Image (cartoon, rainbow, N blue to C red):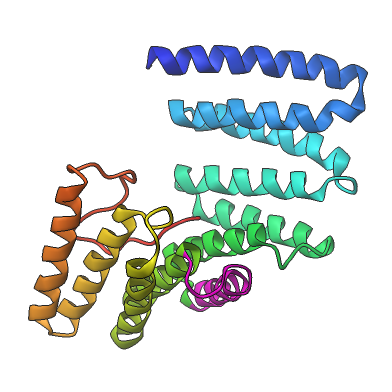
Amino acid sequence: MDTALERQIASASRSVEEARRLAYHDPVRVGALVEQISVLADLRQKEGDFRKAESLYREGLFRAQELRKQDPDLLTGIYSLLAHLYDRWGRMDKAAEFYEKALSISADNGLEDSDKVATIKNNLAMIFKQLRHFEKAEGYYCEALETFQRIDGEQSSRVASVYNNLGVLYYSSMDVDRAQAMHERALAIRQNLNEGQMDPADLSQTFINLGAVYKASGDFQKAEACVDRAKRIRAAMNGYHPNPRRSASLLIDKSL
């Protein structure tokens, strides 16, 4: 194991033990305990020990339920973190189950119009796409898109990401025309974002995705132009790509 990661895990483990001790004597500190547990669980994920991460998140979930009425956001967050864990673990049915639980808690507490809930809906849609439940995926993407448009306006990176994800969904369901329309919208937004908002990796991937759609529709000239543009962007990034899930030959959707 990476020695730096080992040190981080050791430090986080000590913090969790101290937080457990304090929460035992003072229930007000339960929220702080849940946060410390989440930090350690995330490190265990990075280590690749999903079972230990699951056990920690389950402990956090149990403690967060004590604050269900006072802090529903905390409970929603733990359900979402567990869902993300199951996604990384390849347990898609469990990921969908826990994202839906997070949405249920948010709805029960009048939080369903927040950007956090829109993010959960986007990520749940990605799970349903992988499970090939395309209609459910489309519904959640559209709900997320509506919320981000209301909060951010049309010209935002989050709106562009959902358009991108809808494009990937439509491509997966062989609806090339709608896939093209979504990727072109994503591209139009990403090309107009200012430097602080625009991630070159996202822009590059948009060209890759759009190129794949053009190729599927038989427009090989546009497809080649998109791939060439993506290559130039990546060359300017010195080959660095922050998301290892992306590939120059695949359409990739994006969690938020």
Tell me which residue sits at (76%, 59%) in the image: 106
In the picture, the quarter occupied by the N terminus is top left
Tell me which residue sits at (9%, 79%) in the image: 220
Indicate yes or no whether the magenta region holds residue 148. yes
Q: Quadrant of residue 99?
A: bottom right
Q: Could one spot residue 173 in this view of the protein?
A: no
When the figure is inspected, residue 158 is found, relative to residue 35, above or below; the finding is below
User: Could you tell me what secondary structure mostly forms the magenta stretch?
Assistant: helix
When the figure is inspected, residue 147 is found, relative to residue 74, above or below; the finding is below
Q: Position of residue 77 (x, y in %)?
A: 68, 46
In the rendered view, does 222 fall on the left or right side of 52?
left
Q: Quadrant of residue 26?
A: top right
In the rendered view, does 36 fall on the left or right side of 256?
right
Q: Position of residue 71 (x, y in %)?
A: 84, 45
Tell me which residue sits at (77%, 29%) in the image: 32
Q: Could one spot residue 39 in this view of the protein?
A: yes
Highlighted range, magenta: 135-156
Q: Nearer the viewer, residue 21 or 29?
A: 29
In the rendered view, does 214 fall on the left or right side of 202?
left
Tell me which residue sits at (29%, 83%) in the image: 176
Q: Residue furthest bottom?
A: 177
Indicate yes or no whether the magenta region holds residue 140. yes
